[in-house]
Image (cartoon, rainbow, N blue to C red):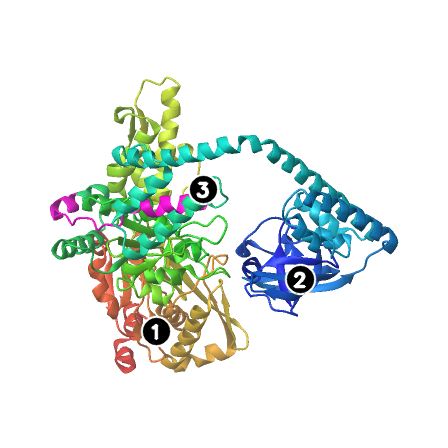
């Protein structure tokens, strides 16, 4: 059964109605076939297929059968009974599932009375038709009508009325009332048609005048064309688009499509229903820059200066950007990898994109992808849909006005998938240098060259980015800022901007060095500087209040005043323990906000040898616990009685915070070994690394952030996997100077340094 959704169309049971073949196919996706059953369902409002849902339809429909399909381009449908739509599900384009039951009529019409009403209707329509030459032909059709419903179905496309009025006819259970409603509509149509005809006859006298006017108009159009060529600033819309297409430099495919749409605009006229859509399309494609921009020489020193002025630190990031610019300078075109800036919020990933654009003297475009779940947001909507728009990529190109902007695709890790498609997959073509030279937006329906665009992506984490998309990009890590970095950023950038935004002159406010250091250390907990910016904005607003109240003195913010000015308590960071105890060891963890220290606590209690784990540990850390327990049992066989006669309780504080990741293996092993040997590990020691069952220490990620957390928390010695030693070159010198960093290859080395085993045992373990 073919389901036909219709809107604002009069349908009645037990009647013959006509459907244009094209309209039938556009509503159902299939061509009409004779003897096919159909189901007519009524939409509450005009909607495209991608907007339809279960609440889009009225609860009553109409069954029918396709009785004839004519080559002239129409199909004949004989309607049958009304049905109740008990349930409806929309699965996608042309995919609807119904649960229906027959709806019976009540108060049936007396056949003799209906014949009388039908005869009067026919007479009224024949009288109206006789006024026209086609009335003789129409008479042959009119006399064949067998019921009032047939009359209404034949005139359905001309009968006026609201959608609710037409649905009310279908919903009426009483056959008598329904017939009267149809009769009223038909008489109203005949009367309106007669009045319209009378108005036309009254205008017959003006026919010659109208012909003359048309001839004059044609002559004026010809003269206007010549004037347009002489004065391009004062042209009609059609002529304006003709000139734009000629001058745009479009590729052959795009020009062909643009001229096709322009011809439709000419034929439809400005008052047609589609003229707005056609105008918007032409305005968009002619507003794009289709020509390649000239490759100018790029001054590397100037580019470095711009990057240094706008951003403090980020040495590795700036070096990679300068490399990219140097390659572009030699190639005289866009080349190199797509850069993905990955790091914690507030580390400057998005803002550095604007600096890159400034250093290259290019336009800057930012496209936010956070929360995008519709593929059409990337590729655009097809123009067959109501409210169709281009995708965000082409919209950004259009707004920039050039073909080679610097485009920042922000938050690519926050793309999501829905029934509307996978936006991340749509980005594959955009970011592939081998494919994006012929990128086709669905709205434009023609290829556009994106190869000159410098794409820069940003993300907080790589975990949620699909592997095929990640492979197309070169990941550049944005490390967190050290306290010294934050101090410089605050002095150079954040404080001047905050004072400017609040209208405070430099001589009216001073934030002391101690206050600034206290804000960084005690009132923020992040790798970036967003929280720091908020605190400085707050201080400027407090100062603005005092200045407006008439204070002539310079506002000086001391560290002792921060608690009152910021209206918040200092953030409590984990610090090293004051006393050391067996079974407690300090570990290092990575979070999206930067690094943190965490304590692994262990305890033996009387029991049956069970291992109890608390602190909301994830699957990876639970496996690390099992590894650590097995490893300690194998290294200290003489302590096996402790495990058999006691339960081992392992706890990681902050139980409300989920914890997971492959970096707590050596910390867990050391904590259990400390408990077993009843020897405390120095609280100034911290460690990170995963282990194997052979006792090998494997590498981890987030080393820079973890070392920053260790230095901030008062740690003096950190054990790291030996395979992570090359990563130390990316760690700030200030951090390395304040920490003793010990690379280790096996867990026995850690236990030896912590005083839990002797050198002989360590050698035996190795």
Distance in Å between CA atoms under marks 3 and 2: 33 Å
Q: Residue 570: which disc?
A: none
User: Can you give x and y, in whole percent of width and height, for residue 529 in the image?
Assistant: 32, 45
Q: Dot 2: within a 10 Å radius of its alpha carbon, few (fewer than 14), some, or many (20 or more) residues?
A: many
* Labels 1, 2: front one: 2
> Can residue 694 be seen in this snapshot?
yes
> What residue did someone put label 2 on?
77
Left or right for 434, reference 616: left
Query: Badge 3: how crowded within 10 Å, few (<14), some, or many (20+)?
Result: few
Residue 668 magenta-highlighted? no
Q: Earlier in the sequence, mark 3 or mark 1?
A: 3
Disc on res. 269 = 3
Residue 446's spot in the image, x, y percent?
34, 56
Q: Is residue 526 above or below residue 201?
A: below
Q: Within 10 Å of the Cα at label 1, are there few (<14), some (14-19), or many (20+) other Cα atoms?
A: many
Q: In the picture, which quadrant includes the C terminus?
A: bottom left
Is 723 on the left or on the right of 501, as rendered?
Answer: left
The tag on residue 691 is: 1
The secondary structure type at the circle numbered 3 is loop
- Sequence-first tag of 1 and 2: 2
**Nearer to the camera, 484 or 194:** 194
Please name the residue shown 38% across and 20% down the image.
548
Task: Please indicate, yes or no, whether residue 346 appears anywhere in the rendered image.
Answer: no
């Amino acid at each position: 059964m073919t389901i036909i959704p219709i809107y604002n169309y009069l349908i009645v049971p037990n009647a013959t109605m006509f459907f244009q073949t094209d309209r039938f196919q556009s509503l159902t996706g299939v061509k009409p076939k004779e003897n096919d059953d159909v189901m007519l369902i009524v939409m509450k409002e005009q909607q495209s297929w991608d907007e339809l849902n279960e609440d889009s339809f009225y609860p009553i429909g109409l069954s029918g059968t396709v009785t004839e399909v004519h080559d002239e381009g129409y199909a004949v449908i004989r309607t049958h009974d009304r049905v109740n739509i008990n349930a409806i599900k929309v699965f996608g384009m042309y995919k609807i599932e119904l649960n229906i039951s027959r709806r019976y009529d009540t108060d049936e019409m007396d056949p003799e009375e209906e014949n009388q009403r039908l005869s009067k209707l026919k007479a009224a329509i024949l009288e109206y038709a006789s006024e026209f030459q086609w009335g003789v032909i129409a008479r042959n059709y009119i006399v064949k009508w067998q019921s009032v419903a047939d009359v209404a179905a034949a005139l359905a496309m001309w009968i006026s009325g609201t959608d609710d009025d037409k649905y009310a006819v279908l919903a009426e259970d009483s056959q008598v009332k329904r017939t009267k409603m149809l009769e009223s509509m038909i008489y109203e149509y005949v009367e309106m048609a007669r009045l319209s005809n009378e108005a036309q006859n009254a205008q017959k006298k003006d026919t010659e005048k109208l012909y003359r006017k048309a001839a004059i108009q044609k002559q004026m159009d010809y003269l206007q064309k010549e004037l347009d060529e002489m004065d391009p600033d004062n042209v009609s819309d059609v002529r304006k688009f003709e000139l734009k297409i000629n001058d745009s430099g479009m590729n052959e495919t795009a020009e062909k499509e643009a001229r096709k749409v322009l011809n439709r605009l000419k034929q439809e006229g400005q008052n047609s229903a589609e003229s707005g859509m056609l105008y918007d399309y032409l305005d968009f494609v002619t507003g794009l820059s289709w020509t390649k921009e000239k490759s100018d020489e790029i001054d590397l020193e100037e580019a470095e200066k711009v990057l240094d002025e706008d951003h403090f630190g980020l040495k590795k990031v700036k070096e990679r950007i300068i490399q990219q610019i140097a390659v572009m300078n030699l190639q005289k075109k866009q080349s190199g990898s797509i850069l993905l800036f990955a790091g914690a919020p507030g580390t400057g990933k998005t803002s550095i994109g604007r600096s890159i654009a400034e250093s290259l003297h290019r336009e800057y475009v930012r496209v936010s992808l956070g929360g995008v779940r519709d593929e059409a947001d990337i590729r655009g909507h097809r123009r067959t849909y109501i409210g169709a728009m281009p995708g965000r990529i082409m919209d950004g190109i259009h707004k920039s006005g050039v073909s080679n902007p610097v485009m920042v695709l922000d938050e690519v890790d926050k793309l999501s998938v829905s029934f509307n498609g996978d936006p991340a997959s749509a980005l594959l073509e955009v970011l592939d240098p081998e494919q994006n030279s012929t990128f086709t937006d669905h709205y434009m329906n023609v290829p556009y060259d994106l190869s000159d665009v410098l794409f820069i992506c940003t993300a907080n984490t790589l975990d949620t980015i699909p592997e095929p998309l990640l492979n197309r990009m070169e990941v550049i890590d944005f490390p967190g800022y050290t306290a010294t970095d934050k101090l410089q950023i605050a002095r150079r950038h954040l404080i001047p901007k905050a004072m400017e935004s609040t209208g405070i002159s430099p001589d009216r406010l001073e934030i002391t060095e101690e206050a600034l250091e206290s804000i960084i250390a005690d009132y923020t907990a992040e790798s970036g500087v967003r929280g720091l910016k908020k605190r400085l904005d707050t201080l400027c607003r407090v100062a603005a209040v005092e200045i407006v109240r008439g204070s002539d003195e310079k506002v000086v913010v001391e560290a002792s005043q921060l608690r009152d000015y910021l209206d918040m308590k200092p953030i409590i960071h984990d610090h090293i323990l004051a006393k050391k105890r067996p079974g407690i060891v300090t570990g290092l963890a990575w979070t999206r906000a930067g690094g943190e220290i965490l304590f692994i606590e262990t305890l033996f209690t009387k029991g049956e040898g069970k291992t109890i784990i608390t602190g909301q540990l994830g699957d990876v850390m639970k496996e690390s616990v099992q590894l650590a327990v097995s490893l300690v049992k194998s290294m200290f066989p003489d302590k096996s009685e402790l495990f058999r006669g006691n339960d081992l309780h392992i706890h990681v504080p902050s139980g409300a915070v989920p914890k997971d990741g492959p970096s707590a293996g050596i910390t867990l092993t050391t904590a259990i070994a400390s408990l077993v040997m009843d020897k405390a590990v120095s609280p100034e020691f911290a460690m990170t690394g995963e282990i194997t069952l052979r006792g090998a220490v494997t590498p981890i990620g987030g080393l820079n952030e973890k070392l920053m957390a260790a230095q901030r928390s008062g740690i003096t010695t950190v054990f790291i996997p030996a395979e992570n030693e090359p990563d130390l070159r990316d760690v700030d010198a200030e951090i390395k100077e304040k920490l003793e960093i010990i690379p280790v290859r096996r867990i026995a080395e850690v236990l030896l340094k912590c005083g839990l085993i002797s050198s002989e045992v360590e050698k035996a373990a190795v």
